[in-house]
Image (cartoon, helix red, strand yellow):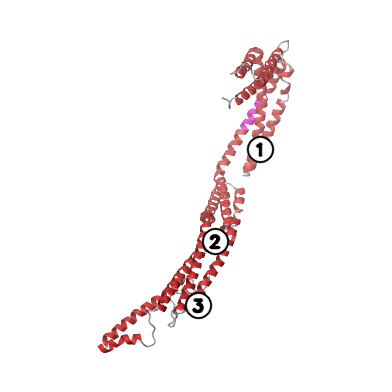
Amino acid sequence: MTATPPQPNSPSVPGAQEHPARDVSQPVRQVLRGSRHALRDTLTLVSALPLVAVLALPAAFAGGGTRRWFGGRAESQRAEAQAAKDAAAAAFYELDTAQRDLRISIETITAVDDSPAARRAITDFEALGRRIDEASHQYIQAVDAHDLDRDDLEASAAARARTELAKAKDELGRVKQDLDRFTDGLGPLLGKAETQLARLAPAVERARQGLLAASNALDAVRGSGLKADNLATRLAALAPELTKLNQGAGQHGVPQTLERAERVAREAEAVRVEAERLPEKAAEIDHRLVSLRTRAQALTTRAGQVEPVLSELRRRFTAACWQDLQSVPDRAGENVRQAELKLKEAQAARDEQRWPDATALLSTVRALLNSTDESVSAAGDRLRRLNAVQKDPQQEIDRTRFAIRDAQRLAMAGRNTPDPRHARPLDDSVARLERAIGTLEGRHPDYWHFLTEAEGVRQAVAGVVAQIREERGGGH
């Protein structure tokens, strides 16, 4: 906002300086100091004059073309106009100060927020600025149009000046009210912007400290003899991001810089954690290599024991009891050989410090050995269960019947007749068990079929029980 310079002898008219309050008060203080010096010199002069001369002084001051400062309608109008001028100046300064403060708020929002609401606020601020310029121009014109210090100022001219200055002051006040309302409406946007700005410097500093900590951790790992090339590559990739952080938010924007700082801090922390854990990870891989190698050797021994188990199964039970186990010895031997080969590859990866490769190979070895363990254990478990049911099938029968009766009691609880949805599968389970028991008769009972059928019946019954409990209230 610019202003036309006021009359030079009007101390209350604002100038066009950036800080008008200081520009106006400085001449006033100079005038006051000059007045005090003049009064002191006058008193000194009076004290040196003869009495007759002193008595003649009032006439001298009253004459000589000087105007009267007090009394008369024109002087009263002049005083009122001067008061209106002072009030308008105060309103002008107040509006100018509020506009400066609001501009700072708008610049804060602009630096951080690019949302539609922020763009709309900028447009509204520009429109409000034009209104402020118009009101300020009206005020400056009113000030420039009237010289209230003229000796021949007429009462009508003073009255017009008072009216125009009062009108300018009222317009400045209305614009100030609109500006205050607009400022209040910026609260959420300004709060969000200030929050992001407050986060910016700490976020950038955390990113820098994170990179430093990651670099130090990587140096320590390398000092222990570990290469950590993968981590070094990841850390080097963050260097361009640090350069952008150092260039500042003024070049890259506050939201982008804040997001970049948080991402760099996050990735640097991940590198630091992995670097510090690397010695422990190397030791863990060494331990797993030894453990899995021992386990592979043990499974080699156990796989050699499967063939005698199969021989006994063939000799004592029907083909249905052991045919699905025929391939166990060969499959177990092949799995163990594959596991031993992968162990050698894992050891080579460990020696070359290719940690991800070593970890992946060890996981493959573990899966192979687990599968072998299950198949080898299945042969021995099959023989144990067949021996038990051959000796006393009643135990398996009673176990299955108990499960059926327990489900039937639950189905009848609180009812006179069971729900067909529950009764039908339970009845089918009873019939299925009876048929399985029938397979035990004859010269060569199919014990394995009986065991799998009994297990199937118990699973079906368990499903009915779960359904009943769910329908009656979440398993209660």
Q: Which residue is mark 1?
A: 344
Name the quadrant containing residue 468: top right
Vertical comparison of 461 with 107: above or below? above
Q: Residue furthest top?
A: 442
Q: Alpha-carbon neighbours of circle 1 within 10 Å: few (<14), some, or many (≥20)?
A: some
Q: Which residue is mark 3?
A: 145
Which amino acid, by three-letter code, is at mark 1?
Lys
Identify which residue, 339 or 86, lies in the foreground. 86
Residue bounds of the magenta highlight: 293-305
Q: Which residue is mark 2?
A: 106
Residue shown at 39% from the left, 75% from the top: 29
In primary-sequence order, the first of circles 2 and 3 is 2
Name the quadrant containing residue 438: top right
Classify residue 30 as left or right of residue 277. Answer: left
Identify which residue, 280 or 244, lies in the foreground. 244
Is 312 a magenta residue?
no
Which amino acid, by three-letter code, is at mark 3?
Ala
Q: Residue furthest left?
A: 51
Residue 411: x and y, percent?
62, 19
